[in-house]
């Protein structure tokens, strides 16, 4: 079924965005910085892909799940969407880990350390 991979990517992005909005981890706590990080990471990895395609290392495989639309030779439209999802997911996970570690280290009201 053409487009199924893109659909699942968009559903996954919506899920991560919902978690981000609920806990204000990345985009909802620092929107400009988060957007710049996702755009810069995506641009870096698209450039990486372009270098791999130009050198013949990366080729587009055939799958009935892809739309069949290429942005460039061997670069399906789903690739930048996946790379943006990957960068956003990494940003949200990083922010969540920092928050969890920050809570573990925060002193309690009586001056002691909280129990894990």
Image: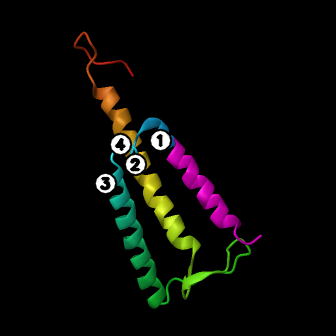
Q: Residue furthest right?
A: 1
Q: Disc 1 or 3, which lies upstream in sequence?
A: 1
Q: Residue at x 39, y 22 (%)?
A: 116
Residue segment shown in magenta: 1-18
Estimate the spatial distance between the alpha carbons at disc 1 and disc 3, rounded to whole Å.
Answer: 15 Å
Q: Which residue is mark 2?
A: 27
Label 4 secondary element? loop
Q: How many residues crowd mark 4 within 10 Å: few (<14), some (14–19), many (20+)?
A: some
Estimate the spatial distance between the alpha carbons at disc 2 and disc 4, rounded to whole Å.
Answer: 6 Å
Label 2 secondary element? loop
Label 1 secondary element? helix
Q: Which residue is mark 4?
A: 29
Are the residues flagged by discs 2 and 4 in contact, CB closer than 8 Å? yes
Report the front residue among 36 and 91: 36
Counting every numbered tag in the picture gives 4
* Disc ID at residue 33: 3
Residue 104, given in percent of the width and then of the height, sits at 33, 27
Q: Work out whether residue 95 can be spotted.
A: yes
Are the residues flagged by discs 1 and 2 in contact, CB closer than 8 Å? yes
* Residue 54 occupies quadrant: bottom left
Estimate the spatial distance between the alpha carbons at disc 2 and disc 3, rounded to whole Å.
Answer: 8 Å
Q: How many residues crowd mark 2 within 10 Å: few (<14), some (14–19), many (20+)?
A: some
Q: Disc 2 or 3, which lies upstream in sequence?
A: 2
Are the residues flagged by discs 2 and 3 in contact, CB closer than 8 Å? no
């Amino acid at each position: 079924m053409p487009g199924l991979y893109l659909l699942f990517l968009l559903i996954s992005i919506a899920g991560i965005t919902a978690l981000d909005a609920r806990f204000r981890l990345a985009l909802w706590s620092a929107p400009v910085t988060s957007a710049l990080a996702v755009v810069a990471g995506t641009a870096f990895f698209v450039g990486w892909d372009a270098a791999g395609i130009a050198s013949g290392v990366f080729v587009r495989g055939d799958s009935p799940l892809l739309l069949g639309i290429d942005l460039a030779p061997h670069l399906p439209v789903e690739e930048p969407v996946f790379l943006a999802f990957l960068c956003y997911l990494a940003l949200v996970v990083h922010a969540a880990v920092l928050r969890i570690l920050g809570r573990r280290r925060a002193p309690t009201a009586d001056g002691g350390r909280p129990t894990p």
